[in-house]
Amino acid sequence: MIPVNEPLLGVKEFQYAAECLKTGWISSAGKFIGDFEERWAEYCGMKYGVAVSNGTAALQVAIGCLDLKPGDEVIMPTFTIISCALAAIYNGVKPVLVDADPGTWTMDVSQIESRITSRTKAIMPVHIYGHPCDMESIWELARKYNLTVIEDAAEAHGAEHKGKRCGGLGDISCFSFYANKIITTGEGGMVLTNNEEFAEKARSLRNLCFRQDRRFYHTELGHNFRMTNIQAAIGIAQLERIDELVQKKRWIGQTYSEKLDNVPGLILPVEEPWAKNVYWMYAVVLEENIGMEAIEFMERLREHGIDTRPFFLGIHEQPVFHKMGLFKNERYPVAEMIARQGLYLPSGLTLKEKQINEVADMVISILNTSAYSTSETVLY
Ligand SMILES: Cc1ncc(COP(=O)(O)O)c(C=O)c1O
């Protein structure tokens, strides 16, 4: 089986993690935590880093930094992981959705303004599959309506918007370091910001809102979202080789794109002129007229030893939210189409050119047997 993803762990990851075990610094105190926070913030061009237990927690903490009242709203794409909507809901605020852009699959910025109300507190752009959002349009709206921008850069380590790194483009940014992310700590996440008050609040929220002045006396609701020193140690080792990891992802993306360019029935990921795409996962969309949905295509690839994953099902299509009375009659046609027709191909950091060739050849071969390729009216 060619796996959809595999982390690349080296000797340093073992050495640094072993140092924690040898010295006994295995919980959330220890030198690696502060070091990782500082160095990741610096890499992304932000001042403060607050390491947390995962990316979902980072999003929840980020929204929790705002001054919120029940019924407030956060605008986000429907085409994203459920974590974004959960982060709003667990903070007592409402996720308000926009569709995906058909080119980059990130949030369609042309839909944001019509969704802004007097309750809107923030916009949450998500850099999908490693391609940055159109941040300029988002900043313009944020300035005009006095909104906070919370970037979800979980999938975009090292990606750039006009030469500036993702994660350094909002008022607050959030990362995941889950095992399938470009750099990993196993499980883990981080909140970054230039705003000292947000950083202070994020540190407090992650650690049960302990007060500085009186131990075990709490005036706010917090969480235990702490990262361990062992995780941070692995993170440091990964960060030391991030340029190599980002370069490898871009090579995988570019190699697939060369091999699959102009294949009928297949929509490939783009790289806008203002963007550096890190191809976190090499994602493709099957044209609807090939007569095959992604799920069937994935099954065919699996039969040939190729592991893949489907695209996100939009937030507005999640039954759990319908049960709560949310998004019931909302329609977002681009997100609905790509959710059914999209999949991502093996994109792990250990992937070899031979494997990319094998996957690309099989993709082409399956498409050649699809209804699309045998239909005279469509093709020729
Ligand atoms: C865009 C995005 N945001 C947030 C998350 C949540 O991260 P975690 O799995 O670490 O909670 C993910 C996870 O894959 C993600 O892809």
Image (cartoon, helix red, strand yellow):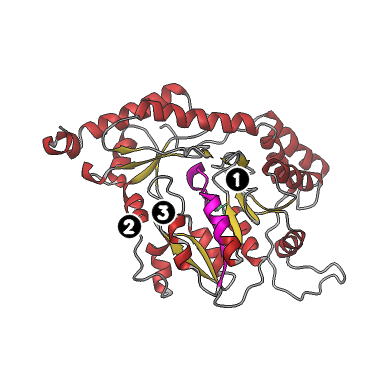
Residue beneath label 2, please? 333
Image location of residue 277, percent across then percent down: 51, 38
Distance Cα–Cα, label 3 vs label 1: 19 Å
Judging depth in this view, the residue of 52 and 268 nearest the camera is 268
Q: Amino acid at mark 1?
A: Cys
- Region of the chain picked out in magenta, as a range: 120-141
Image location of residue 59, percent across then percent down: 60, 59
Residue beneath label 3, please? 100
Residue beneath label 1, please? 166
Quick check: is the Cβ at mark 3 less than 8 Å away from ligand 1? Answer: no
Image location of residue 56, percent across then percent down: 58, 57
Q: Could you tell me which residue is drawn at 20 percent across and 37 percent down?
A: 370
**Quadrant of the image containing the C terminus:** top left
Q: Could you tell me which residue is drawn at 73 percent across and 66 percent down?
A: 208
Q: Is residue 259 above or below residue 282?
A: above
Q: Is residue 337 above or below residue 249?
A: below
Quick check: is the Cβ at mark 2 less than 8 Å away from ligand 1? Answer: no
Q: Amino acid at mark 3?
A: Ala
Callout 2: SS? helix
Crowding at mark 1 (Cα within 10 Å: few <14, some 14-19, many 20+): many
Q: Which residue is the extreme one toward the left?
A: 376
